[in-house]
Amino acid sequence: MDQTNNVSTLAKRPAFIPRRSQVLRLMSGWFLRLVTIVVYVFLYLPILIVIIMSFHPEIYLTFPLPGYSLRWYEELLHDELMIRATLNSLWLGGLTALLSAIIGTPCALGLVRLDFPGKRVLNTFVFAPMIIPQIITGISLLILLNFIRIPRGYPYLIIGHVLLTLPYIVVTVSSQLYGFPRDLEEAALSMGANEIQTFFEVTLPLIAPSIFAGMLFAFTVSFQEFVATQMWATPSTYTLPIRIFARIRDALTPEVNVVGVLTILLSFGVVAIVQIMSRRGKRGNRYGI
Amino acid sequence: MTTLTARLSVMQRLRTRPFLRGLVLVGPAATWLFLFLAVPLVLVLVYSFWTYRPGGIMEHTFTLENYARFLSQPVYGRILWRSFSVGLQTTVLALLLSYPTAYYLARRPSGSHLLIFLILVPFWTSYLIRIFSWMLILMERGVLNSVLLGLGIISQPVRLLFTPLAVVVGMTYSALPFMILPIYSVLKGINPDLIQAAKTLGANELQAFVEVTLPLSMPGVLAGSVMVFIQGAGNFLAPAILGGTGADLMANVIANRFIEAFNWPFGSALSMVFLVAMLVFLLLVNKWAALESIYGPNK
């Protein structure tokens, strides 16, 4: 009697436990999928709305749209202020990316490969421009350059944007250096190349993709930075985001959306290029770098 | 000939002295950071003790007036408090939405290259445009009001833009990629054998998650939260575009002292208070998190 009872409870148990955990797993699976779908809709609905509203035919942004037209795409082509700001941002971004790469690449090499006094301090400090609120970076550089009597404008923008983009170059390049095949350099050295030859003929070509990716990110950051830049730019040196912000504040038209569409295309292109590059090379880090 | 020997000796010196080599490599970046970030921050501190005379005149005489003003006028304390509060609200909301998403992406058996790509695009898209997109949604004749009117839920357009809620929604939206990516990358790196081991030892799905996965994913949660909090508390654009007159945060007030009020000493004092408050807060979080990682697994 006792024994049969025991057997029956024993027999029931294994059947019961999987069922409960199966229910749990099914529920958590549905929950996770639901949140994920909500998050993706949440992420892309506003972007979609920016794109749709760029085809608005009238001056005031209203929804639903009374029709569709390319009017504001055409107006942008004749908007001298916006074009000048765009060109300004383009060359500022390019110069920033170049300078940042020239300074940042050796810095990443030093931080990854060498030991020197103060390395830990520098390692933290390199990322300070990412962590300190941009407004503080903005006003502090403004105070310094104003203190030594340099008028606001390009010097501020170039110095400041290199400062703000340096961490991106260092992160990108050092993440590739950690998985770097050192034996190739040793081979070059043992075959009679000096260190400078080795650097330019072995190391540099191998880390070139990450430098390029870092430069793309530096360009993107510079091209879109607003908060610190507003402290450095003057009306004649307005960058694109400063001009867009002024329009949002004072004269909002669907033209802002057209510019928005162009910046979305830019980030789309940058991420796509870097992803394709990193898929061909090694696995990227958490920022897809 | 002399230049050649000179060059050789420089190279030899570089090779034999790692310190010099380090200096050559990191020197330019370190100089840049020192001259254009460290020195300016010290200068902000100095300015915060200088005297401001009405009319935009600044005297290089020591005063504590700027800090006294921060303490005596409660509005500034309130704005500092609001900055922290908005930063924390954004962090919590972003975390609640991001963790399940990151978990789902990390546990997907098939690859999630495309899904990650779709997180990266907004990560690199202009912050200004992402905040602006919420203006289109929330404004009086915007998307949300027109949808709600169309569904008959409301009969009059509701005021959604220029509210504190609009600021938090816009910030949370912009914060999502910054939260999802670090959590995803940490979750992806957790050895699945550990979770399997917990289950073999009798833990169910939920227990395995709470006891194994969650503690191991804390570094990602912390990294994302710190980034999102800093971005939220120091935010300028969301209050400026989506917030009403009373929505200003520290960044807006500081910017205003420098651009419109031309009271640089007081602006510098506000910056110092804000920076120190942020640093203290982050150090406390860091300490607490470090304790957690020491005692956590033994719970």
Image (tube, grey):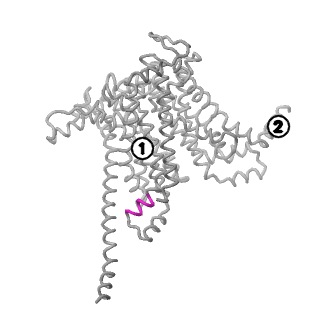
Q: Quadrant of residue B82?
A: top left
Position of residue B55 relative to residue B8, above or below, is above
Q: Residue at x 45, y 67 (%)?
A: B198
Q: Is residue B209 magenta?
A: yes
Q: Main secondary structure of the magenta part?
A: helix
Q: Residue at x 66, y 39 (%)?
A: A118
In the image, farthest residue toward the right: B1
User: Could you say which is closer to the camera, residue A73 or residue A256?
Assistant: A256
Q: At numbered mark 2, what does the secondary structure look like: helix, strand or loop?
A: helix
- Which residue is under mark 1? B121
Q: Quadrant of residue B234?
A: top left
A280 vs B28, left or right, is left
Which quadrant is the N terminus of chain B positioned in?
Answer: top right
Q: Residue at x 31, y 69 (%)?
A: A20
Q: Which numbered disc covers residue B9?
A: 2
Q: Position of residue B213 (x, y in %)?
A: 44, 59
Span of residues in magenta: B206-213
User: How far apart are the alpha carbons under marks 1 and 2?
Assistant: 50 Å
Q: Say few, some or many: other residues with alpha carbon within 10 Å of mark 1 (under 14 / 14 to 19 / 20 or more).
A: many
The chain letter under disc 2 is B
Q: Position of residue A92 (x, y in %)?
A: 52, 28
What is the three-letter code of the residue carrying label 2? Ser
What is the three-letter code of the residue carrying label 1? Val
User: Could you say which is closer to the camera, residue B132 or residue B77?
Assistant: B77
Q: Quadrant of residue B225?
A: top left
